[in-house]
Amino acid sequence: MNKNYERWLNSENIDEATKKELLSMSEEEIHDAFYKDMEFGTAGLRGIIGAGTNRINIYTVRKATQGYAEYLMDHEFRAVRRGVVIAYDNRRMSYEFALATAGVFAANGIKSYVFKSLRPTPELSFAVRHLDCFAGVVITASHNPPEYNGYKIYDSHGCQLTPEYSDKVTICVNRVEDELSVPCLTPEEAGALIQFIGEEVDEAYYKAVKEIQVNPDVDKSDLKIVYSPQHGTGNIPVRRVLSDLGYNVIPVYEQCEPNTEFINTKSPNPENPVAYELAIAKAKETGADIIITTDPDCDRLGVAVLENGEYVLMTGNQGGAVLLQYILSQLKQKGKLPSNGLIFNTVVTSDLGDRVAEKYGVGVEKTLTGFKFIGDKIHMHKHSDGKPFLFGYEESYGYLIAPFVRDKDAVQSSLMLCEAAAYYKAQGKSLYDVLCEIYAEFGFYKDYLTSLTIPGEDGAERIKSILATLRSNPKSEVCSIKVKEIQDFTTAEMIVKGFPRSNVLKYILEDGSWVAIRPSGTEPKCKFYYSVVAKDAAAAEEKLSAIRKEFEPEI
């Protein structure tokens, strides 16, 4: 019998519901739930909710918080005085995990500011800076299925911790020997160490979002927008901001009510076409011009555009290119485009947006995957060379327009995308028309992501072997196209270029196409990113199919 399982089963500190779950487990379930401790990675915790050291639950959340509290007290004496902001989404156990987090901080003498009800992740980032706190925690599993939840930590800039600091937190978390005996106070016991917050922060955040408008007087009267928050946190802030500014928003009411099981959506992930089914039906019924949808914690934005009577889904890369074209062209037209401005995106983001930025004389800097690296870039440039931030984005539907938030922000993105749609509609064009104009100027870019899910203990080893094989047997050409460069982000060469060491490989081909491979930091997946450059869609599809066959293993 697993020793950790027995320790949990026989502990005086285990609640009755967890003990009942432990007793109902099969041997296979016991092994999977206890064969290791849940890893505290660069994105904090994310996993399946349930009993066990390899699951997210009250006890593993308390352990993570105790580790973070010890890090704050060891490294940052100001943390105790300035405090921590805590937000949470609509998922199972999110509120309970938020209170457990606050309770552990309180037991360590650290003050917490806890939102009274669910709030979007970008508002948590905003609140850390707005309240001058030293850290933040948000309880969310983003766009994952209902059985998941997660725990993400933020620094005093409202940015997720980069590896330099998250590695130190991980050491502190791993030093917590017994997750079942971590002290935790109730709000009543904590007194002034737990303060609940709400509307005053909301109003400050909404005010800041409204100020990002480039053309505040754009004609909105003829634009119809269908919006779905996918049962998550975006419902109030997105609708409030757009409504205040005069946009005609038609909600998908079936998906507006917060729900732990996402009962009226087949997927809460804007990257998944099935997430749009109800919204498309509503759009067809109302004759809407565009559909926007946000994921449960409202940091990702998906969009579909009416084109020839059908709603065409735009990828995160396409949405980023269109937003860039709108923002930069309008800033230039108004004489407000700085000569030294910068945009940031990641090494797995399409180069199409880079071409748009270069056209306007805007610099482009790449980061590793994860918006924390973009947030860190914003902070670094602000305090070094002062180069102004103009836009940040990644291929996974995350955008940031103004840096009062240091994470991707779907509330900001919703407003800017709707403004762009209204502006172009007044010119007789759709957002899709703008995308086609970009393709006509720079060539057709086909982007694709394959996520191979390989769960369990054997899966982790299989994922390691995929990267190891590609490193030991590098390709000199792919589909008869010569390999121009192989970037291995574990090497000293890439570290010298400013990238933290990361298990990522990127093949760059002579025709401008590329392939990047990396394991997910939060899920049992190996991800293959493709960006294929061709003369048109048909040629790109054919080239993509051939390249995929050379890289993806049969599972």
Image (cartoon, grey):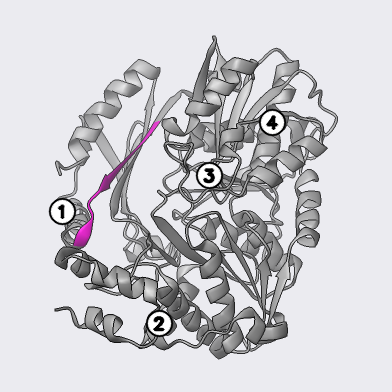
Kindly check if marks 4 and 2 are in contact, taking CB atoms under 8 A apart as contact: no
The residue wearing badge 1 is 469
Q: Which residues are magenta?
A: 447-456
Looking at the rendered image, the quarter that the C terminus falls into is: top left
* Residue for point 16% across, 43% down: 553
Structural distance between the alpha carbons of marks 4 and 2:
44 Å
The residue wearing badge 4 is 418
Tell me which amino acid carries mark 4: Cys
Structural distance between the alpha carbons of marks 3 and 1:
35 Å
Which dot, 1 or 2, sits closer to the camera? 2
Structural distance between the alpha carbons of marks 3 and 2:
31 Å
Looking at the rendered image, the quarter that the N terminus falls into is: bottom left
Which dot, 3 or 1, sits closer to the camera? 3
Other-residue count near label 4 (Cα within 10 Å), few / some / many at <14 / 14–19 / ≥20:
many
Left or right, residue 551 beside residue 529: left
Which dot, 3 or 2, sits closer to the camera? 3
Structural distance between the alpha carbons of marks 1 and 4:
45 Å
Structural distance between the alpha carbons of marks 4 and 3:
17 Å
* Residue for point 14% across, 41% down: 554
Residue 130 location (% of width, % of height): 75, 65
Quick one: SS at disc 4?
Answer: helix
The residue wearing badge 2 is 171
Other-residue count near label 2 (Cα within 10 Å), few / some / many at <14 / 14–19 / ≥20:
some
Tell me which amino acid carries mark 3: Asp
